[in-house]
Image (tube, grey):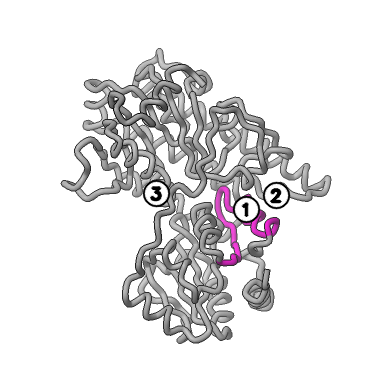
Amino acid sequence: MSTAVTLFLLSVSIAYNDAARILAMFPVPSISHQVVFRPYTQELARRGHQVTVITPDPAFPKGEVPANLTEIDVHDFSYEMWKSFYKVTSTGDNDLILQMTLAFSIIVDIVEMQLKLDVVQKILKEEKFDLLLLEACAKPALVLSHVYKVPVIQVSSFGPMNFNVETIGSAWHPLLYPGILTKRSLNLSKWEKLEELWNFYRIEKILKGVENSENEMAERLFGPDVPSMSELKNNVDMLFLNAHPIWDGNRPVPPSVIYMGGLHQKPQKELPADLKRYLDSSKNGVVYISFGTNVQPSLLPQDRVQMMAKVFSQLPYDVLWKWDKDELPGRSKNIKISKWLPQSDLLRHPKIKLFITQGGLQSTDEAITAGVPLIGFPMLGDQWYNVEKYVHHGIGLQLDLLSTNEVEFKNAISTVINDER
C-alpha cells in the first residue's frame, strides 16, 4: 500500500484531520451496483470530506444533498444506452460470452458520454482532488488517474473479476482461484475444467479487444499522450470488494484488498402497511420471486413464465412476484405482482418461506442475513458463480430457466421449503 493511501485512510478515521477532496465515478447504470457505493460516499461526506460523485442513480433528491456531497446525475442517457443490455439478460439464455462482450463495450461508451458532459469537463479542468474512487468493473474510468495524479481505490459491487485481482497483485487462477465470471468452479471433471479454461480464454480475448476501444476513447477525450489501460492499471492502490472472504474461496490477497461484503445492508425498517397486512394474513406463508434489476421479467420467454405461473398455482403458498408490467399472463389467485418491493425488509418477515432469485450478490446477501432459503436461476455475469455456492453451502438449489420443467420446479420448491437444515 502506498504511503499516500495510508495517510488518506488515517485521515478518514481521525475526525480532527483536514478534510480530503474525493472524486468518485461509478458509471454502470444499475441500482444494484449503486446501492453498494452509497455507504462509502455518504460516510466520507458525513465525516467532513468533500465528495463529488458521478452516478446514474443519485441518492438524494435535488436540493436535499448534504453540503459537502455533490452528485452529478448521469441517469437518463446512461440508462438509455444500457437498454440494449436487457435484450441479452432477459432471455434466460446462458450465453455469458455474448453478455460480457456487450456489457464491456457499452461501458466504454457510457464512460465516454459521462466524461464529455459539460459539468464533468468543468470539474476536471477547474477542481483538484486528493483521492479517486472508481468502479472496479468499469476499467475505462481509470483514465481519471491520468488527469489526477492521486491515489486510486477501485470499488466493486461484487467479488473480483480476473483483471481486478491481476491489477492489484492478488492470487488468481482460472481453476484454483477463479474470478466471478465463471459458470462452474467446484468439483469439476477433467472435461469441465477444459470447458472452463476455454471460457476463461474467450473472456480474456473479449477484454483484450475491448481494451483497444478503451484506449481510443481515452485518446479522444484527453489526447494522444494518455497512457494505455494496461499502464493506467498500475495507478490502482487498493481494491474494495463487496464480498466475504469465504464466498471468494478464501483467496490469498495482499493487504491492499479489503473485503466489505454486505455493506449496502441497512437496519430493518417497518414494511409499508399494505404489504405488511398481505404478509401477516398469509395462511401458509409466501414464496417471493424477483430476478433483480438487470432482468426485465416480462421479456423472459413466455413459455418459461407460464411454466412458473402454472407451478405457483398448484402451491399451498401465496406467491409475491416482482413484475415489471401491470398484468401477468396466466396469473392465478394466489399470485400477487408488484413493480417494486422493499426486498431487504421483506425477506426478514417471518412469513417468507422461499426466495426465487437470479442469484445477484446483493439479493444473496440479503437472503442470508434474513435466513431465507434460495432457488437460483442464474442468467447474468456473476450469478452462476453465486448460485453454485447456494448448493455448496447448503442454503439453496440451482436450476436452469430454459430446461427446467414443471415437475422439477415444483419438487425443488418443496425440497427447499421442507429442508429443516
> Residue 335: x percent and y percent?
46, 80
Q: Which disc number belongs to residue 371?
A: none
Viewer can see residue 121: yes
Q: Amino acid at mark 2?
A: Arg
Q: Which residues are magenta?
A: 372-393
Relative depth, front residue between 16 and 79: 16
The reply, left or right, for residue 381 in relation to residue 250 is left
Task: Identify the element where label 1 is drawn.
Answer: helix
Q: Which disc number belongs to residue 384?
A: 1
Which residue lies under the disc numbered 3? 35
Mark 3, Cα crowd under 10 Å, few <14 / some 14-19 / many 20+, is some
Q: Specify the quadrant of the image occupied by residue 220.
A: top left
Viewer can see residue 399: no
Between the residue at mark 2 and the residue at mark 1, the CA separation in whole angstroms equals 7 Å
Residue lying at the far left of the rendered structure: 63
- Whether residues under marks 2 and 1 lie with C-beta atoms below 8 angstroms apart, the answer is yes
Q: Which disc number belongs to residue 184?
A: 2
- Above or below, 80 against 285 in this view is above
Looking at marks 2 and 3 on the same chain, the residue that comes earlier in the sequence is marked by 3
Relative depth, front residue between 84 and 297: 297
- Above or below, 141 against 406 in this view is above
Q: Amino acid at mark 1?
A: Trp
Task: Identify the element where label 3 is drawn.
Answer: helix
**Does the stretch in magenta take in 384?**
yes
Mark 2, Cα crowd under 10 Å, few <14 / some 14-19 / many 20+, is many
Q: Amino acid at mark 3?
A: Val
What residue is at 23 percent from the left and 35 percent from the top? 68
Residue lying at the far right of the rendered structure: 190
Between the residue at mark 2 and the residue at mark 3, the CA separation in whole angstroms equals 28 Å
Number of numbered discs visible in the structure rendering: 3
What residue is at 43 percent from the left and 57 percent from the top? 293
